[in-house]
Amino acid sequence: MKKWIIGILIIVATAGCHSRESKPFPNASSIKRLDGSAITPSEIDETVSRLMHAAKVTGAGITILNGGKIVYLKTYGFRDLRKSSPLTPDSVMSAASFTKVAFAYLVLQLVEEGIFALDKPVYQYLPKPLPEYSHYSDLDGDPRYKKITTRMLLDHTSGFPNWRRFNDDKKLHIHFEPGSRFAYSGEGIALLQLIVETVTKRPLADLMRERVFQPLAMTRTSMVWSWRFEGDHANGYDEQENSLGPQRRWKADSAGSMLTTPADFALFVQAILEGQRLRKESRELMLSPQIQILSKHEFPPLSTETTDENKPPELRPGMGFVLDTVRQSLLQRRPRRRLAELHGVLRRREDRHGDHDEQFQRRGHLQGIAGNSAEKYLYTDRMGGLHAVQRPAVKKSRGGARRDLPLELKPAGRTQ
């Protein structure tokens, strides 16, 4: 049986009617770390508070799971800085690209039911050729779209850019042979939404509510804004901590419209690890490496610069997840500086109209402000991704360079 330690760290630059009471989570007195040691809640508090102060982060929600169970769930800072309203475990905030993980969970349910096949070209599910849809007319003349499958859209190997608006001509192109390499793509997830809604003849917001949020008791999660959220929601903030208000999204977007809370999303991750509403094979597939990531940077995703640092099996995309490992240097720090379990996701404040590629450029300065390597690793470009971490064996680092620790997951049979 695999032993998982999962860290979820949602940093918001993150207002008010009547809200339901939010009770503190009964955190464990000791939380297991990746190296088998333990860390206390007070040590987590000290580290998180210091990092938030250094980066001027308005609010943060943190969850740690040991062995597939939530053992730590706490929020820090404010949901409304001007009113000094505290962020709570039930504060609704933009899930951004965490939406993709929940959407992948839905798609795998549909695969189990035989509605989709992972390796069937998705164009075959449509009643007319893909380029005849106005949003995909740019693909006319490029037959490679017929090679794109559900698997490729879920593991970001379709060849699409993150978003077409970052192309020089603002048009959608297939930039490499589908299935040949990893390149993070919101366009790919958006295409899969079209396929899902076309085949099921149901709007995505309804499917997610009925198949994901309601069954998992995610009572304050939705693909679109709801009046229920008015009492306890987090504002967005820009780099100068000016409030941008909440993200009131009215149209379901599989790549980023989900609104959720730290408590609800923790329930979602726990459900995946427990295998709820998915057969064992599907759950293993979701958390199994699909293709090797050789790109040096996740953003911009179409960069051709490669690296040997991610040699198998250290960094690979799963189905909606990115499977990564933790550097030995994090495990060697004093306990108060160890937050390796939380390494996977740290999101700096995000304005309502920004995108990962833009954010990467304007957040570059953050990588240099941390006081040690553990803190520096937290300020990375891994925005809106959730990393699943299995307890590894230790490798020696070379010359201070990053050396990740191996995951031992059953591969899905594809490598680059």
Image (cartoon, rainbow, N blue to C red):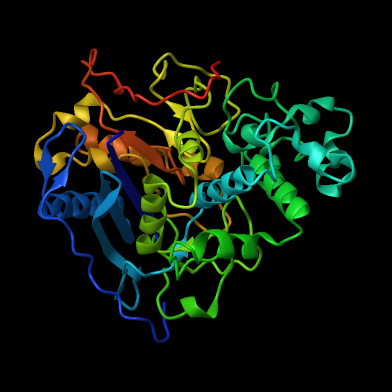
Q: Quadrant of the N terminus?
A: top left
Q: Nearer the viewer, residue 94 or 165?
A: 94
Whether residue 368 appears in this view of the structure is: no
219 left or right of 121 in image? left
Q: Nearer the viewer, residue 243 or 291?
A: 291
The percent position of residue 307, horizontal first and vertical second, equals: 45, 16
Residue for point 37% across, 48% down: 274
118 left or right of 155 in image? right
| Above or below: residue 401 compared with residue 216 | above
| Above or below: residue 267 compared with residue 84 | above
The percent position of residue 279, horizontal first and vertical second, equals: 49, 43
Residue for point 28% across, 18% down: 401
Counting every numbered tag in the picture gives 0
97 left or right of 308 in image? right
| Above or below: residue 96 compared with residue 391 | below
Q: Quadrant of the C terminus?
A: top right
Whether residue 356 appears in this view of the structure is: yes
The percent position of residue 386, horizontal first and vertical second, equals: 42, 43
240 left or right of 21 in image? right
The percent position of residue 82, horizontal first and vertical second, equals: 35, 75
Residue for point 68% across, 30% down: 119
Residue for point 62% across, 29% down: 157
